[in-house]
């Protein structure tokens, strides 16, 4: 038995019979059908599928940014359909979402952008946050870019800063939409290895979408979407 097949923790994400369409009437486009999936604590699951197959739609539903048209979604043991107010805010605080399009704050340096990913708590410790942010930047190959402004960074470097920002708050769930799309093989590998390490050590669940076959082997499972339906496919380890 490898580390990947050992028992993981309780489910962090559970989608039951999720269906999603955009638009209404003649404009209606059905994008996802009968999605049933689970992701457990400590697991890194990849979502693959052709362009337009519904990966971003599924990820935004799992990240509570979009309400599914039908079906049930449980996150961290809580039924989220119908949940609102402070209960939903509290849940969202434990989730980090990395968008397909980069979104660093241009008025903050790389280091400050990473620190912005920490949730403020009464026990926040700025020195510790800065140390962790510097460590993450170093692990992602950006040790010398802490003081750089987003404009001074390449697309791939910005993407890695955004990834460090999702990781710093030790969330329970990270949802990352094509986190390695702008990265070369070496930095793509750095990113997925860090996400995997966080999943295993901090018991975080990670769901990431990708077209990048070079990183499939990092996942504990691969879900593939085709024609709006999601099914599990085996991963071939090289
Ligand atoms: N806001 C929207 N309104 C209407 N249709 C949409 C909307 N967002 C996405 N779609 C459609 O839903 C389908 C799935 O889109 P989605 O962005 O989820 O695909 P994807 O798998 O992430 O593609 P890619 O690999 O190119 O990022 C596409 O046909 C798209 O045109
Ligand atoms: Mg997409």
Image (spheres, grey):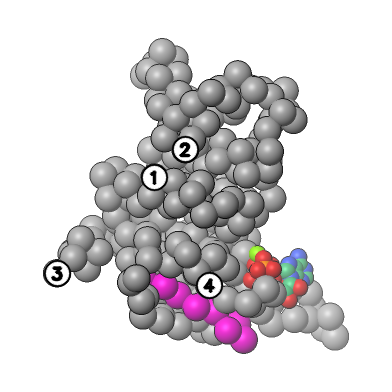
Q: Quadrant of residue 54?
A: bottom right
Q: CA distance from mark 3 to mark 2?
A: 29 Å
Residue 50: x percent and y percent?
A: 63, 77
Q: Earlier in the sequence, mark 2 or mark 1?
A: 2
The residue drawn where x is 75% and y is 81% is: 29
Q: Check the image and name the residue furthest to the right.
A: 26
Q: CA distance from mark 2 to mark 4?
A: 24 Å
Task: Name the residue tied to disc 3.
Answer: 1
* Tag shown at residue 48: 4
> Which is closer to the viewer, label 3 or label 2?
2
Determine whether label 2 and label 1 are within 8 Å by CB. yes
Establish if 151 lies above or below 20: above
- Mark 4 C-beta to ligand 1 under 8 Å: no
Where, quadrant-wise, is the C terminus in this rendering?
Answer: bottom left
Is residue 113 located in the magenta-colored stretch of the structure? no
Nearer to us in this view, 194 or 117: 194
Q: Check the image and name the residue furthest to the left.
A: 1
Q: Earlier in the sequence, mark 1 or mark 3?
A: 3
The residue drawn where x is 36% and y is 76% is: 236
């Amino acid at each position: 038995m490898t580390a990947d097949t050992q028992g993981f923790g309780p489910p962090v994400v559970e989608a039951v019979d999720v269906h999603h369409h955009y638009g209404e009437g003649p404009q209606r486009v059905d994008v996802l059908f009968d999605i049933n999936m689970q992701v457990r604590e400590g697991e890194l699951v990849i979502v693959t599928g052709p362009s337009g197959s519904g990966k971003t739609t599924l990820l935004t539903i799992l990240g509570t940014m979009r309400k599914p048209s039908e079906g049930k979604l449980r996150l961290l043991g809580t039924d989220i359909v119908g949940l609102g107010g402070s209960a939903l805010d509290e849940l969202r605080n434990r989730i980090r979402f990395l968008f397909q399009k980069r979104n660093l704050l241009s008025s903050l340096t790389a280091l400050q952008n990473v620190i912005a990913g920490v949730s403020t708590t009464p026990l926040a410790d700025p020195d510790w946050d800065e140390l962790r942010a510097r460590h993450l930047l170093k692990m992602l190959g950006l040790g010398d870019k802490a003081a750089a402004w987003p404009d001074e960074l390449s697309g791939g470097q910005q993407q890695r800063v955004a990834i460090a920002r999702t990781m710093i708050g030790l969330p329970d769930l990270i949802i990352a939409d094509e986190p390695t799309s702008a990265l070369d093989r070496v930095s793509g590998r750095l990113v997925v290895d860090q996400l995997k390490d966080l999943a295993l050590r901090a018991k975080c669940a990670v769901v990431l979408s990708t077209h990048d076959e070079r990183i499939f082997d990092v996942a504990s499972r691969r879900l593939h979407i085709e024609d709006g339906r999601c099914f599990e496919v085996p991963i071939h380890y090289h």
